[in-house]
Image (spheres, helix red, strand yellow):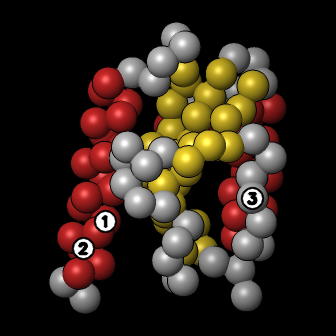
Amino acid sequence: MDKRVDFEGSSGEALRDFPLLARRQAGHDLWRIQQGKQPLDWKPMPSIGAGVGEIRIHEEGAFRVVYIAKFEEAVYVLHCFQKKSQRTGRADLELATARYKALIARRRTR
């Protein structure tokens, strides 16, 4: 069975604002993750948290989808954004990290 995809905070709205081709690529890669496969272009993001990955999309610009898929019940999308420079911006890293920490804390209280 496929894992569901849960969007943390405003990440779902941010993804809907991606250009069409970037949105389609993100959707395809999230589907691959749901199937237990790797996205087509991604890298681990241990600086955000254990098990966090970043889907890299190069369609109509550079876009990123930060996610964690290590839990059985769902793939959690922590943050979606357009990349404006070589380095990921501090605000983007801080937001993804805060959402990761909130997710972990919420899971502990279950």
User: Residue 68: image x %, image y %?
Assistant: 50, 61
| Real-space Cα separation, disc 2 to disc 1, in angstroms | 5 Å
For mark 3, give the secondary structure: loop
Mark 2 element type: helix
Disc 3 crowd rating (10 Å Cα; few below 14, some 14-19, many 20+) is some
The residue that mark 2 highlights is 106
First in residue order: circle 3 vs circle 2: 3
Q: How many numbered badges does the structure rendering display? A: 3
Crowding near the residue tagged with mark 2, few <14, some 14–19, many ≥20 C-alpha atoms within 10 Å:
few
Residue 70 horizontal side relative to residue 22, left or right = left
Q: Which residue is mark 3?
A: 38
Disc nearest the viewer among 3 and 1: 3
Image vertical order of residue 52 relative to residue 108, above or below: above
Determine whether 94 is above or below 52 in the image: above
Q: Amino acid at mark 1?
A: Leu
Badges 3 and 2: C-beta atoms under 8 Å apart?
Answer: no
3D distance between C-alphas at marks 3 and 1: 22 Å
Residue 65, by quadrant, is: top right
Judging depth in this view, the residue of 8 and 104 nearest the camera is 104
Between 27 and 33, the one lying in front of the other is: 33
Residue shown at 71% from the left, 32% from the top: 57
Give the residue displayed 55% in from the left and 13% down from the top: 86
Q: Amino acid at mark 2?
A: Arg
Dot 3 amino acid type? Gln
63 vs 33, left or right, is left
In this view, the mark in front (3 or 2): 3
